[in-house]
Amino acid sequence: MANNILLLAGDGVGPEVMAEVKKIIDYLNKNKKTDIEISEELVGGASYDENKTPLTDEVLYKAMDSDAVLLGAVGGPKYDKLDFAKRPERALLRLRKEMRLFANLRPAICFSELVSTSTLKPEVISDLDIMIVRELTGGVYFGEPRGIKPLENDEREGVNTHRYTSKEIIRVAKVAFDLAKKRKKLVTSVEKSNVMEAGLLWREEVEKLHLDKTYKDIKLNHMLADNCAMQLVRNPKQFDVILTDNLFGDMLSDEAAMTTGSLGMLPSASLSEKDKKKRIRSMYEPCHGSAPDIAGKGTANPIAMILSFSMALKYSLNQDDLSLDVDNAIKKVLSDGLRTPDIMEEGKRKVSTAEMGSAILEKLK
């Protein structure tokens, strides 16, 4: 039975890095009998240019009916003056909400070959392997009421609401605990329970879930978000799985990513609960943005996009061995000294987006 993957290349460097994934899918179909059927649609600014909306209903329905969605990147300065609801980034939020993608997995892994590209000392960053589990559909990004309203004397007020329910907290906490079972059995739950009621509820519900005998072998630590931000640059290897909410997860995952040297190296996965057909909806995307300043120059790093596809093989297509093959191919290419400009070092060979993708493909063969 074919696996249906929807490719949403999006804006900026998105189409360039997605092209390298298509090479790999084509090879796997021809040589590994993966039977992956791909379709391609517009999203973000590309969709707005064509359809005057960042995400059409037709593309949304197609995403919801796919076995996995691969997304490149959305956004760019040409869209900054659009009405808020029309901006490319709203496509991401709508996809996450309608597909009910409540759990975002953001690995922060420092490849041994790239230790010198990090701003941290080698002894601090070498062998780093963190998984950040971010709640994705609740909190301040979705809470109501929200908006900007006029006040007296020509003043205006901006309002956002940070809101969580017990159910929202428990379901994402289960994801973190289940991942920790397969890792180092350590979860650090991060919030601001000292000043926010939603943070206090978060801590209480996570603590309550931890008492379940299913998780008796998992060690749970609690940490305030500001302290976690500091510890990520001071001693990142103290962490294994970090569990946190939408707002703090947005910031901490980018911070953790940059400790490894480049956003161009890091993937992410967003997952739903199982539906009535026992299927998990999913979307995979690189952590880097659309990078409009280098779009079209052939210098973007495709590794994060390829690693996102690797995560899709693992979490959506149940192809763990192929996922590992892709990861190992990337490591071999880095060991050979190939580098895109974002991770370039003295004595290494600078390559283009397409050259990096082709080199990874050759190591798969």
Image: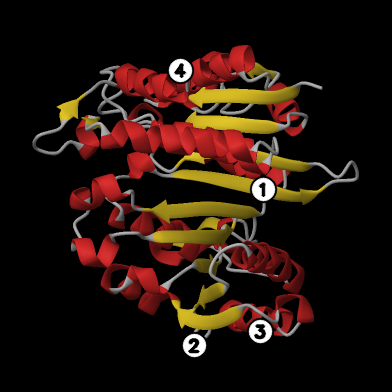
Q: 63 or 262: nearer the eye? A: 262
| Sooner in the amino-acid sequence: mark 1 or mark 3 | 3
Disc number placed over residue 19 in the picture, else none: 4
Q: Secondary structure at mark 4?
A: helix
87 left or right, relative to 302: right
Q: From the top left corner, tell me how far across and down residue 84 is, in percent.
A: 50, 40
Check disc 2 and report the residue beneath it: 194
**Where, by quadrant of the figure, is residue 283 drawn?**
top right
| Sooner in the amino-acid sequence: mark 2 or mark 3 | 2
The reply to whether dot 4 and dot 2 touch (C-beta < 8 Å) is: no
Name the kind of residue labelled 1 in the image. Answer: Leu
| Sooner in the amino-acid sequence: mark 3 or mark 4 | 4
Disc number placed over residue 134 in the picture, else none: none
Q: From the top left corner, tell me how far across and down residue 275 is, in percent.
A: 85, 46
Check disc 3 and report the residue beneath it: 207
Q: 85 or 335: nearer the eye? A: 335
Check disc 1 and report the residue beneath it: 271
Q: From the top left corner, tell me how far across and down residue 144 is, in percent.
A: 65, 61
Q: Residues within 10 Å of mark 1 (few under 14, many from 20)?
A: many
Name the kind of residue labelled 4 in the image. Answer: Ala
Q: Residue at x 42, y 32 (%)?
A: 329
